[in-house]
Amino acid sequence: MEIREAPLAEVWALRREVMYPDEHISFVQLDDDNKGLHLGIYEKKQLISVISLFIKHGELQFRKFATKKSEQHRGYGTALLNKAFAIAKEKGCKSVWCNARKDATKFYTKWGMTESGASWFKYGLEFIIMKKVLDMQIIPAIDIIDGKCVRLTEGDYAQKKIYNEHPLEVAKQFEDAGLLRLHLVDLDGAKAGAVKNWKVLETIAGKTSLIIDFGGGIKTEKDVKIVFESGAAFATVGSIAVKNEQEFAKWLLGFGAEKFLLGADVKEEKIAVSGWLEKTDIWVYDFIEKYIQHGVKQIFCTDVSKDGKLEGPSINLYKNIIDKFPDLHFIASGGVSSLKDVEALHEVGCKGVIIGKAIYENRISLQELKSFSYEHS
């Protein structure tokens, strides 16, 4: 068995033969095929199985997975998927996904892939996204006040420390270290109740390939549009989800729930809002459950009492949340002081961890984070 890159002409021919034998060859030619990596298994110089890989925004998608009918159930598909997951690990991808026929999902569940989102119909067949998150994402944070990179302690604006006057320099350091994500927080916006530092977002998004979630001061639909138009992959929201559920639910429907990262900022298991300046009586578990029902996929939780103090994260709180909502893409935030903390969060099942002050205070090096990402993917 030989696995190697296959020429497009052979790829298209096999796709047509296996998938759509009654259609013209153009029917199986994808618009971006020239941007993909097409891996084939050859026996006696004949292509018998093929998979096409596309990497975008730190995710690997595979498409048009096809094996000659006479050669199916002989392990060729398994070999190609093994190769696909190995490439995803090598490239530091955060997830692997595909559009799968609903009647074929059992094959993908063996690989730890799960259904994501609602199904749809095409060509008279039902399809659904199957996806696997490749372990835990390391998400460095940049907090912005007056266009500068800062960190607060316990969300207190009076306890501010400036680390760099040029956030782009910091973002490039993260990118150069091989990290894929960035958590960008507009603290001026959070305090003012309106997005303020969108120019910083625009600059970082335009000059790096980082996948950015941006939050702070997102209160109106206009704010959401500014955030996406400035280059964010996700809009990070918190206070609006607490104070105006109807408005936030409208955004989820209008922009897509997958475009939002919901922040659950917590003091003693109760939700805090407005840059952590106000504490509510809303139990964090009720808050999370409500928005899962609204379709939210990703939630991060910050224990404000831990944030910026380098005393360790709220492991027990996060474990309780994960135990209660095992299918949630849960991201931990606040208190991380060492790589040992990151490992502990990984052990309890966090899908991501946002790290800020520990990086800036040199408690954790970027090289350590890069190594951790590769070892645990």
Image: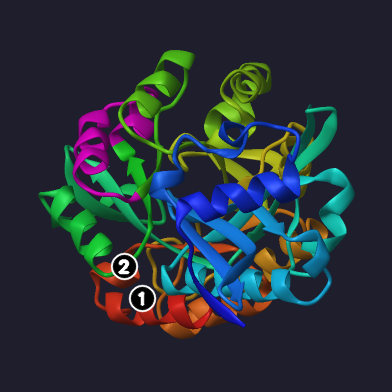
Residues at badges 2 and 1 in contact (C-beta under 8 Å)? yes
Question: Which element is circle 2 on?
Answer: loop
At x 19%, y 44%, the residue is: 207
So how many labels did they put on this image?
2
Which quadrant of the figure contains the N terminus? bottom right
Q: Does 208 appear in magenta?
A: yes
The magenta stretch spans residue 111: no
Residue 344 in the image, given as x and y percentages of width and height: 58, 80
Quarter where residue 321 is shown: bottom right
Viewer-closest of 224 and 126: 126
* Residue range corresponding to the magenta coloring: 188-210
Q: Is residue 55 above or below residue 123?
A: below
Specify whether residue 162 is in view.
no
Residue that carries the numbered disc 2 in the rendered image: 178
Q: Give neighbour class at mark 1: few <14, some 14-19, many 20+ (Cα, 10 Å).
A: some
- Label 1 sits on residue: 370
Query: Residue placed at 32% from the left, 38% from the top?
Result: 186
Image spot of residue 158 (x, y percent): 27, 48
Three-letter code, disc 2: Gly
Q: What x and y, as percent, mark residue 194?
A: 36, 22
